[in-house]
Image (cartoon, rainbow, N blue to C red):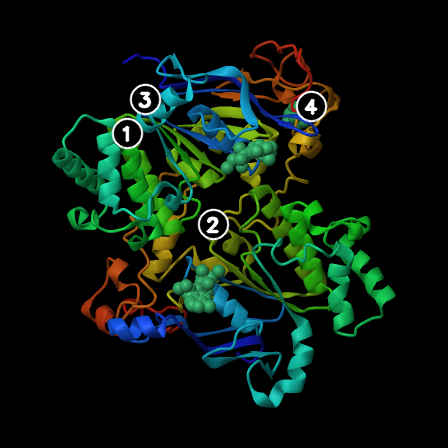
Amino acid sequence: MSDAFVRVDGLHRSFDVSRPWLERTLSGRPRETLKAVDGVSFAIRRGETFAIVGESGSGKSTLARMVVGLLTPTAGDVVIDGVSMTGRADRSRRKELRRRIQMIFQDPFASLDPRWRAGPIIAEPIRAFGLADAREADRQAADLLRRVGLDPADARKYPHEFSGGQRQRIAIARALAPKAEFLVCDEPTSALDVSVQAQILNLMRDLQDALGLTYLLISHNLAVVRHMATTIGVMYLGRLVEVGPARTLFAEPRHPYTRMLLDAVPDLAMTGRRRMAVLGDAPNPIDPPAGCAFHPRCSLATDRCRAQAPALRDGVACHLVD
Amino acid sequence: MTSGPVLSVRDLKVEFASRRGVLRALDGVSFDIGRGEVLGLVGESGAGKSLTGAAVIGLLEPPGRIVSGEVRLLGERIDALPERQMRAVRGRRIAMVFQDPLTSLNPLYTVGQQIEQTILAHLPVSRREARRRAIDLLKEVGIQGAERRADAYPHEFSGGMRQRVVLALALCAEPDLVIADEPTTALDVSVQAQIIALIRKLCLERGMAVMLITHDMGVIAETADRVAVMYAGRIVETGPVAALVGAPLHPYARGLMAAIPRLDGDRERLAQIPGAMPRLQDLPRGCAFCPRCPENFAHCHVERPELVTRGEHRVACFLYGDGLADRAGDDGAAPAPEMDGAPGEAVP
Ligand SMILES: Nc1ncnc2c1ncn2[C@@H]1O[C@H](COP(=O)(O)OP(=O)(O)O)[C@@H](O)[C@H]1O
Ligand SMILES: Nc1ncnc2c1ncn2[C@@H]1O[C@H](COP(=O)(O)OP(=O)(O)O)[C@@H](O)[C@H]1O
Ligand code: SF4
Ligand SMILES: [Mg+2]
Ligand SMILES: [Mg+2]
């Protein structure tokens, strides 16, 4: 995709989850590695919201942290606006890139320093990136507070004086402060009540429209993802099993896992539609099933599924979809 | 057995004494749950759902205390029992399931041992019979290979399987009532679907009453027979699930439904409710939802609405009658005069 703003290329990340050396030696256990992200590729166009959805442990946060450069990939690369996040050659351009990529986390309380007031929290990145002097940074912080729906007078308050939704607004203002263009949002509304979630999702959309932001949105909530995304990727045990436009992906799911997930979502419309029963639990990622990792839970699995992992082809990784 | 409700809660009020005065966290909560019925208690965090569960089961943490109202289990009052008797009610007749299954499980014993011990503590059966029943219960909650898995420890189970074990533990003493506080909130959606189906099945097959506490309207839609929506320590609307989820009346319940993103929806914006639920120390004088309500009018600021009947619903909102006949036709009760001040108002 030539018009990609963000390109994620064959990303892998393993973690060493071995027992301590002594225990291993005594029990004769081998080293163990966990493949949290196992070969993920996708591209995001400028101004788009690309969402990753999947159940816990599927590797979403690990992927997000690699995309913003908080975690080094075991293999693969992330290229943002032509600059590689890993290649040596791009080191100097990468520093400038860091300013343009920011991350928002699930728990805004943990990500805001409780000893700082809201104003300095937001102004800090402006100064740190040398974008303005202290006074101008404070002025911009006041503007940003207004922009995210707070009062400039809130600059003097500490994080604990805000509600959860207001704290998330502050986290968004801080992310925008260095004139970020690409926001990676990891479960940004998962800790919020639905009435507040709606406020934050609407705000994220408004900001995107006004500032031309590009989002990578990570969520376990299919409806949130459906509401926000232009493109959706479904992750299962470290891999993308299906990718497609938000409009069609959930209306015509092709991968059996996508179908199972959709059938598991409570039916708020209470249509009483018949749904596929959900089978079993997600397997242990340290010892994933051979072949297609979904095969033990898949009612359609064949011998080929048990032996050979399907590649993501034409937006879906399943042997039975052609 | 009596033919009345399994659980009957009437005008329950719970207060916390604090340095800044008395905070009223539950203010006049009333509901019934019948045999084989799931009542969904839904609302956003801080609404008072868990507190309602804790008050029913006698587990309010001091300084929280029931200041008035009644809790009846099969007709018998249990809100003022001595702790020793209450403990017997808790283990035997009311079981509790929490969000985190590990709070209900002892890591040092196998799940089989824990279930056996609980059975032996409550029922006059032999050790061998307890073992047999434990395995039957594990089968009933859908644990594959129950004979073998009974000898495994809690940490050897996945989150969803642990919650199944907790349900088995809850069933040991054949309780009349199960209170499940956010039982699927920590689970993935695929596992949640399984646990929801299991709770429904157990409730129907065993004829238990279930009080299902959740913040998730989706879980309510799938599980509950009747729903009570809570806001700021009060029930603001109740009704059969289809009526409540399909056509809520209270502006808060309507706002809540409209704020939920939909899988099929192509809406540009979600309806949003401005602001957040008030803290107990700054509850408004009239309707607690008034500051966030798009439909509030002068009267809402001064008086607190009581529940009135509207078709299948009971709703506490002045849009639905009680003297304001020019705004909405009334078929409900007359407003109860408030003698004891506004809800949650600090009383020195
Ligand atoms: N630092 C780490 N060390 C070991 N394992 C990890 C680490 N971070 C994540 N994992 C494992 O990687 C897998 C994916 O985790 P994560 O990316 O957090 O998933 P998600 O965000 O989709 O829930 C999980 O099995 C998790 O336990
Ligand atoms: N120990 C306590 N002291 C003072 N207030 C409390 C205490 N415990 C709970 N509350 C208050 O009671 C209200 C209801 O809490 P809770 O029942 O836990 O809400 P929910 O379960 O609906 O999220 C909240 O406003 C909470 O702050
Ligand atoms: S009583 Fe008034 S303020 Fe309260 S919900 Fe009804 S219309 Fe809104
Ligand atoms: Mg995560
Ligand atoms: Mg609670």
| Image mark 3: chain | B
SS at mark 1 in the image = helix
Q: Amino acid at mark 2?
A: Leu
The percent coordinates of residue B115 (x first, y second) are 25, 38
Q: Where ligand 2 lies, by image quadrant?
A: top right
Query: How many residues crowd around disc 1 within 10 Å: few (fewer than 14), some, or many (20 or more)?
Result: some
Res A139 quadrant in image: bottom right
Q: Earlier in the sequence, mark 2 or mark 3?
A: 3
Q: Amino acid at mark 3?
A: Arg
Label 4 sits on residue = B345
Q: Is residue A27 above or below residue B300?
A: below
Q: Nearer the viewer, mark 1 or mark 2?
A: 1
Disc 2 from disc 3: Cα separation: 34 Å
Label 3 sits on residue = B35
Q: Earlier in the sequence, mark 1 or mark 3?
A: 3
Could you say which disc has been placed on residue B204 in the image? 1
Disc 4 from disc 3: Cα separation: 37 Å
SS at mark 2 in the image = loop
Asked if residue B227 can be seen in this view, the reply is yes
Disc 1 from disc 3: Cα separation: 9 Å
For residue A141, side relative to residue A202 (left or right)? right
The percent coordinates of residue B87 (x first, y second) are 37, 25
Query: How many residues crowd around disc 3 within 10 Å: few (fewer than 14), some, or many (20 or more)?
Result: many
Q: Are marks 4 and 2 on the same chain?
A: yes
Could you say which disc has been placed on residue B263 in the image? 2
Name the residue nearer the viewer: B312 or A184.
Answer: A184
Q: Amino acid at mark 1?
A: Leu
Disc 4 from disc 2: Cα separation: 41 Å
Residue drawn at the location 64% of the way across and 36% of the way down:
B277
For residue A28, side relative to residue B302 (left or right)? left
